[in-house]
Amino acid sequence: MSHMFTGKPFPPMKNDLILRAARGEATDKVPVWVMRQAGRYLQEFQDVRNKHPFFEICRTPELACEVTLQPLRRFNLDAAIIFSDILVVPQALGMNVEMLPGKGPHFTEPLQVPEDLEKLKSDVNVKEELGYVMDAITLTRHKIEGKVPLIGFSGAPWTLMSYMIEGGGSSTLSKAKKWLYVYPDESHRLLQLLTDVIIDYLVAQVQAGAQMLQLFESHAGILGYGLFCKFALPYLRQISEKVKAALTASGLQPVPMTIFAKDAHFAIEELSASNYEVLGIDWTVKPATARRIAGPKVTLQGNLDPCALYASIEDLRKLVKEMIQKFGTQNYIANLGHGIYPDMNPEHLAAFVDAVHQYSEDMNLS
Ligand code: 1CP
């Protein structure tokens, strides 16, 4: 399969609501999708997962495509996100990552000292190392039949660096943060290496058919303002600028880009001025504050507490209505403030999605 869509043209788009909202164009209702919308809360995902290890699903375009499409069959979502994981980038750099059932990611040999950087591949060819992601994107763009846009994504440099040092989940990230204080030069070297690979990777995803891109800086909050400005923000800016420039240079229209820096409420102003069309916010941020600091141009995405899906459908609908009243119906993409959890009831997700459409359409008419 070709990585560039020089082959068969993709089916025409039937619903571009999310692209319109991302570009700040008028929308008749608020688009909605959910982080981790393909996942363990769906029985049909569990069925695939019981037969295949996690990274085998990522590496097999037909399987990745199937699980990407699963939530679209159940819910009136306005976007699909390609099934993969942020940790495929450390794998492309030569690190060994396993997904332990019930526990999450595990690096067999995390980075311990700066000398370990020598073990990483320096000239990564993303189309070779991660060609399976591009193949999954191209296949999914065809199979989705123009129903909704397809989002590509990557982990952001600091978040990937922290996994590569911690070796898995951690509540303090103290090993990774120690690098920032003790080995700042080597930390910048690693962050720049990741940035270069991420730029190539995101460009290749668009060349393969991704229509929007999201960067997950999931470990932003723990840095605090000072470290965030030094070790995360400059790389996030490089990525948005260079991805857009590279796409333009290759004759492609840049696609809207979203930055989701979890718990980085302290950096809304800086992130809003970083050349991303969309700013994702978690549920701890007050919508009015986000809008005031971000200014009128940036599209906001979020931010219902994922745990609100545990509420009764009646209460959930009220919460959705309040959320849309606070954000307004324009320059806005509804989502949860973080991913959906495995024990959540799919019927409540359906209620969330439908309530977003219904209330925002009503509000636009009134
Ligand atoms: O539907 C979708 O959203 C697409 C698929 C997707 C995405 C966008 C998956 C599948 N992972 C991700 C991104 C991802 N992966 C992030 C960024 C978003 C976030 O902040 O949650 C992060 C931090 C990871 C790392 C990761 N992968 C974790 C977190 C571990 C920790 O530090 O606590 C876990 C548990 C995974 C595994 C994973 N990734 C995806 C799924 C469905 C799963 C569950 C694993 C399984 O099925 O066994």
Image: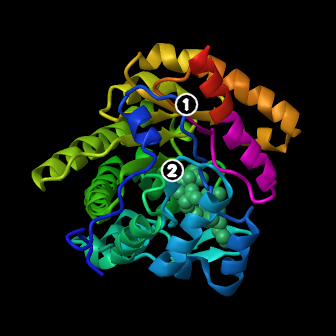
| Colouring | rainbow
Q: Report if residue 353 lies within the magenta region.
A: yes
- The magenta stretch is 333-356
Q: Which residue is mark 2?
A: 79
Determine if the magenta segment contains residue 110: no
Check the picture and name the quadrant holding the N terminus: bottom left
Secondary structure at numbered mark 2: loop
Indicate if the residue with disc 1 has its beta carbon within 8 Å of ligand 1. no
Q: Residue at left 21%, top 71%?
A: 123
In this rendering, position of residue 131 left or right of residue 356: left
Measuring from the top left, give residue 144's x and y in whole percent: 47, 63
* Residue in view at x 21 percent, y 47 percent: 253
Q: From the viewer's perspective, is 256 left or right of 111?
A: left
Three-letter code, disc 2: Ala
**Which circle marks residue 29 in the picture?**
1
> Which residue is outermost to the bottom?
51
